[in-house]
Amino acid sequence: MLSKMESEIISNFPRNVKEDFLKVPEDVLKCACEIRFRVGQPGLISCFQEEFFLSNKISTEDILRLIENFSDNSIYSIQNEMNSGFITIKGGHRIGISGTSIFENGIIKNMKYISSLNIRIAREVKNCGVDVLNQVLKNHQGNFENTLIVSPPRLR
């Protein structure tokens, strides 16, 4: 998993951010579910119940470089996705984007002054729904009942 995250996410970080990540314990990176970058704040790696702060603060230039790298230096090519508040990158990871939106006739046409990025790390969790599936099907002879499954954030 770590090498996949390195190739799909960390490899796109600017050098100073990447160097900060080299100091992070491997067990923290293995359990990471989100990486948050906010201008003027240190980067944050969020595991399921723990948070790990990076040592250096993120600059506006770091945010811009991250977006450029994740878009293969073509921000224009991801403009429509950015206008919806996030982009999806290789591996199914999603990057939430916040900044100032430019509206035209009630529709977001552009974003500027991007101030933070939140990278949600996609990962497979095998057999996580087996117990729930058994409960849903238990009294219904293999037929699904109308079911809504809700959980708090970061619950495994």
Image (cartoon, grey):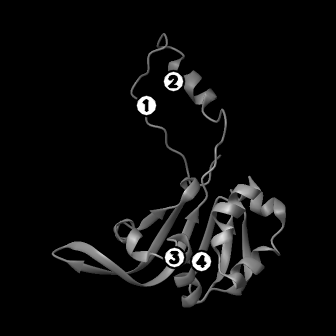
Cα distance between the residues tagged 1 and 2: 8 Å
Residue 144 to residue 4: above or below: above
Q: Which residue position is annotated with label 3?
A: 67
For the residues labelled 3 and 4, the Cα–Cα distance comes to 11 Å
Taking the spot 65% from the left edge, 75% from the top edge, the residue there is: 13
Where does label 4 land, which residue? 37
**Earlier residue among tags 3 and 1:** 3
Q: Give the image location of residue 81, x and y in percent.
A: 38, 65
Is there a contact, CB below 8 Å, between mark 1 and mark 2? yes
The spot of residue 130 in percent (x, y) is 62, 28
Alpha carbon separation for disc pair 2 and 3: 42 Å
- Callout 3 secondary element: helix
Q: Secondary structure at mark 1?
A: loop
Residue toward you, 86 or 149: 86
Residue 144, given in percent of the width and then of the height, sits at 44, 21
Tell me if mark 2 has few (under 14), some (14-19) or many (20+) residues whose alpha carbon lies within 10 angstroms of its own: some
**Residue at the spot of label 1:** 147
In three-dimensional space, the C-alpha distance between marks 4 and 2, rounded to whole angstroms, equals 39 Å
Of callouts 1 and 4, the N-terminal one: 4
Q: Which residue is mark 2?
A: 136
Mark closest to the chain's N terminus, 3 or 4: 4
In the rendered structure, which amino acid carries the disc numbered 1? Answer: Thr
- Mark 1 or mark 2: name the one nearer the start of the chain: 2
Q: Residue reaching furthest top? A: 141
